Amino acid sequence: MISTLSSRARHMLSDVRGVAATEFAIVTPFMLLLYIGGVELGNGLAMNVKVSATAHSVADMITQNTALTTTQMDGILAAATATMAPYPIKNGNTSLMTITVSEVSTDASGNATVRWSKSTSASGARTVGQAMTLSSFTAPGGTSNANISLILSEVSYDYTPNLGFTIAGTVKLSDSYYLFPRCSTNGPATLKPPYYDVKYPATSTCTCVQHLQKKTC
């Protein structure tokens, strides 16, 4: 009896059949987790790049104008959503993306407030007169943060992982850009500062394509 049990024990210890299947069963869950996590991380990073590109594109398009009508503003915001392709911007009737553009102007003391704001969301626009905080700076040519205007573009996107929703839920991706208006019809001899701004909403428009070029419409 003892010799039989000993023989069977030695046989079991030397039997390597099914080892590969056992190792595969142990490793597979971890490999799947790494694969799924890599896919979701890649999608999230790609969408985040798209969000940043959208924010920059909106600010860039707005700053090429001295004045915009409501129709033009709506067209720019609608066109900017195409930057997110091929990722969806709606989940059924629910918008996944919010774009808000505002003009922030400063007084002679450098105090910044919102002059106007427009958003693709009914509740996304900033309040006119809202105080804003800008970093103190001096641009080339001696321009300081007094009596200036900046265009602020803000974009947010609700990203829901396809496979990891139960772990991460919905992740809000967001980015913002400040850009100087590129040209203006304002001038020290005719109008009060800021001299470079974008008027909205306006009944007539003027567009320039060169940085800080004064242009008469």
Image (cartoon, rainbow, N blue to C red):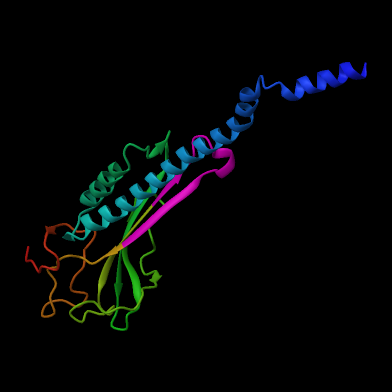
Which quadrant is the C terminus positioned in? bottom left
87 inside magenta stretch = no
Q: Is residue 119 above or below residue 29?
A: below
Residue 145 appears anywhere in the view: yes
- Whole-percent x and y of residue 75? 23, 46
Q: Which residues are magenta?
A: 156-177
Which quadrant is the N terminus positioned in? top right
Front-most of 3 and 57? 3
- Whole-percent x and y of residue 65? 17, 59
Q: Is residue 109 above or below residue 160?
A: below
160 inside magenta stretch = yes
Which quarter of the picture shows residue 204? bottom left
- Whole-percent x and y of residue 90? 40, 38
Which quarter of the picture shows residue 213? bottom left
Report the side of 160 relative to 7 (left or right).
left
Residue at figure coordinates x 14%, y 68% from the top left: 212
Residue at figure coordinates x 58%, y 30% from the top left: 28
Q: Residue furthest left?
A: 216
- Whole-percent x and y of residue 207? 12, 58
Q: Is residue 178 above or below residue 75?
A: below
